[in-house]
Image (tube, rainbow, N blue to C red):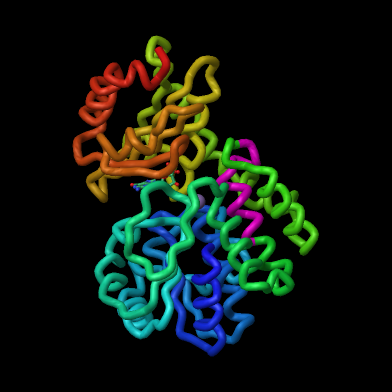
Amino acid sequence: MRKQDISNIKHLLATPKRIVIVPHKNPDGDAIGSSLGLYLYLVKLNHEVSIIAPNDYPDFLKWMPQERIIIKYESQRELSNSLIENSELIFTLDFNALHRTGEMETPLQNSKGIKIMIDHHQQPDGYARFMYSDIRMSSTCEMVYNFIGDLGESKLIDKDIATCLYTGIMTDTGSFRFPSTSSKTHIVISDLLEKGANNAEIHNAIYDTNSPERLQLLGCALRNLKVLPHLKTAYIMLSQEELNNFNFKKGDTEGFVNYGLSIENIIFAAIFIEHKQEGIIKISFRSKGNFSVNEFARAHFNGGGHTNAAGGKSDLNLKDTVDKFITILPSYKNALNL
Ligand code: 5GP
Ligand code: MN
């Protein structure tokens, strides 16, 4: 973060403030980890802090320190609106466009709270007074670690804060294997372990709490996998009926899209998941190398994200969405290095 911004924020944080922390809709490990890590830090400075998530998140994130204090906008609107309206500072974490908070967009826009963005996605919007935006960062959690360090207060990072930040770095880097993992990321991780984060316990809590139904749903997804070798692409479709058959719960499909990328010579993978209630198909894109799924998702599926991981949605039905995808693909022959 810029020196001038840090010194201005330090000044703002010098006296107790009413603060709201907001992660993006459908928050993941990095969104929840960074929100809780920052929350625990700000509480130590005697601020009055709330975390308001737009909606619920998977059970595998519900063990995190102080997770229970997170307010969900979708079920606690009145309380949320009043906290947002009366806030003096608003931290927006792990997203860079207010529409990524769904229905919170308008109350956030209308609030006089000073907005501080901490985020690592591409093409940030300009809604924040202070922006710490860096697409080279592995995760927002790594940035929250840097932010606390820039404020000169690394010593306040205790075991709980370290646990939250470790979790988000681990989930956003695919357990430290994605290209976004830098030597600096490992130095941060080393310090978080030093401060008490337990890597084995955290990994277990996130990844080894499968239900049998989730594994059976994975089996179904893998049976549905289609490979287009001439386009170096693989994709999966999951209908609402298939989700219902395996008692789908939020988070159950997390990571499924990566299986397509594990096939030899495949550099582009997608998963299309039908959500009948919302009336949309939710799409995840992943790639290897230079092929930008951020650009692809923005251009065709009302989404965005990073070069190698992005998401989007479609109002068409499942079959038409996939047909659209297959029709577009050949125009990306060059980008896919074919
Ligand atoms: P996932 O596929 O795991 O939902 O998301 C992959 C990445 O793309 C994440 O960094 C996520 O924040 C971003 N992303 C997912 N869905 C959307 C979307 O609809 N719009 C934008 N702008 N980014 C998204
Ligand atoms: Mn992230």
Tell me the residue at 65%/41% (across/down): 176
Asked which quadrant contains residue 306, the reply is: top left
Q: Give how far across and how far down residue 254 sits, in percent.
A: 49, 42
Tell me: residue 208, above or below residue 81. above
Q: Quadrant of the C terminus?
A: top left
Q: Is residue 317 magenta?
A: no
Front one among 134 and 102: 134
Q: Is residue 230 left or right of residue 215?
A: left
Looking at the picture, does residue 94 appear above or below residue 129? above
Q: Position of residue 43 (x, y in %)?
A: 59, 80
In percent of width and height, residue 285 lies at: 40, 34
Residue at the farthest right position: 194
Q: Main secondary structure of the magenta part?
A: helix
- Most foreground residue, 240 or 67: 67
- Residue 319 in picture, x, y percent from top left: 24, 27
Q: In percent of the image, x 73 and y 59: which residue is there?
A: 192
Q: Residue at x 47, y 77 (%)?
A: 50
Q: Which residues are magenta?
A: 164-177
Residue 299 visible in the picture? yes
Residue found at x 23% / y 20%: 327
205 is higher (above) or lower (below) than 222: below
Q: Quadrant of residue 74?
A: bottom left
Question: How many labels were placed on the picture?
Answer: 0
Residue farthest along the bottom direction in this orientation = 15
Residue 168 is covered by the magenta coloring: yes
- Can residue 241 be seen? no
Residue 183, picture quadrant: top right
